[in-house]
Amino acid sequence: MKIIVTGGAGFIGSNFVFYMMKKHPDYKIICLDKLTYAGNLSTLKDVMDKPNFRFVKLDICDREGVYKLFEEEHPDVVVNFAAESHVDRSIENPEIFLQTNIIGTSVLMDACRKYGIKRYHQVSTDEVYGDLPLDRPDLFFHEDTPLHTSSPYSSSKASADLLVGAYGRTYGLPVTISRCSNNYGPYQFPEKLIPLMIQRALDDKPLPVYGEGQNVRDWLYVEDHCKAIDLILEKGTVGEVYNIGGHNEMHNIDIVKLICDYLDKPYSLIEHVTDRKGHDQRYAIDPTKIHDELGWLPETMFKDGIKKTIQWYLDNKEWWENIISGDYQNYYQEMYGKK
Ligand code: NAD
């Protein structure tokens, strides 16, 4: 089995590469990544020399390059993680989100049509469903919840999901889609909530929290997400969408306080900043379908996963210190007005 994993130098993609290489040592994994600011080759250093791994620096929008790779490798499966993934950046500059997340997805699927494929899997997000009110804890996103997006990021991901469905129906491409809640774990770029707070708390820097921090997210340990995708590839039904969630809803402010507690830092570091434009209130996934049909359940309790994650950032300071130098500093200053 040959699998092209796009975006495999990013957070979830790299964790998926590691998971698959361990679980299926007989598979060949081809990692295709443009290495944007969010992609990091050093993340892949331990697998780089393995005979069943190949890294290709490539933009998924580069049709010629993508076709050439398919011609060389004739993959059986494509799992598309490659995306511009940060909501705040999409609000500042939507265009690259439309390019990569929509056009790039169509280029990959065109290659799948041209060269034949057993499965194209699209990694999507619960953000395509929009948000739920904070005072209705009884409501959840189901696979048939209408797409109702808020940000340019989620709109680009929802557009890609619609295209994937269309390629399935119109061209008979064997597609599946998974929509997952917020992931956390090793190798997450430190612009996202949990690693951002860990690295800033470690340096005793202010911890910027949007508004009152009452927004609710459902958190899933990244390895549980990887397991779910592997199951969908093995046992999922072509043409279906699967929601993946941790049943672990938390207010953003409580996550930040928990990180302070683990690192023994005072809550006085927390600084409430102007809320994100169009900030979604609550995301909550109902993962009943993937549980009932494929037998998937999240295995990592949040209290254990967050401990492992914090410990990973403590043990791998070099990884994130390299990342937050240079360009990232300028971006951070623009977003929050301070270093
Ligand atoms: P990430 O930003 O950490 O990684 C994205 C990767 O894609 C990077 O390695 C980047 O270099 C690569 N990339 C970007 N544009 C590319 C292009 N044009 N061609 C090739 N490679 C390109 O993102 P992530 O958090 O790992 O998310 C991966 C996928 O999972 C995304 O599709 C995202 O929408 C989805 N998702 C993420 C979460 C989450 O909590 N992080 C939750 C649900 C779904």
Image (spheres, grey):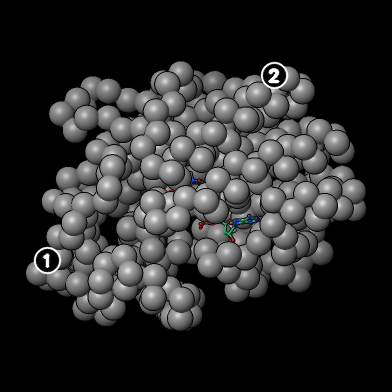
User: Dot 2, how many residues are within 10 Å of its Cα: few (below 14), some (14-19), or many (20+)?
Assistant: few
Q: Position of residue 94 (x, y in %)?
A: 47, 50
Which residue in the rendered view is the most extreme toward the left? Answer: 268
Q: Nearer the viewer, mark 1 or mark 2?
A: 2
Residue beneath the point at 15% across and 65% down:
270
Which residue in the rendered view is the most extreme toward the right? Answer: 72
Under circle 1, the secondary element is helix
Under circle 2, the secondary element is helix
Residue beneath the point at 60% across and 49% down:
100
Label number found at residue 142? none
Taking 174 as reference, is 12 left or right?
A: left
Q: Amino acid at mark 2?
A: Arg
Residue at the disc numbered 2: 169
Q: Position of residue 84 (x, y in %)?
A: 52, 53
Residue at the disc numbered 1: 267
Can you tell which quarter of the image residue 148 is in?
top left
Q: Position of residue 144 (x, y in %)?
A: 46, 18
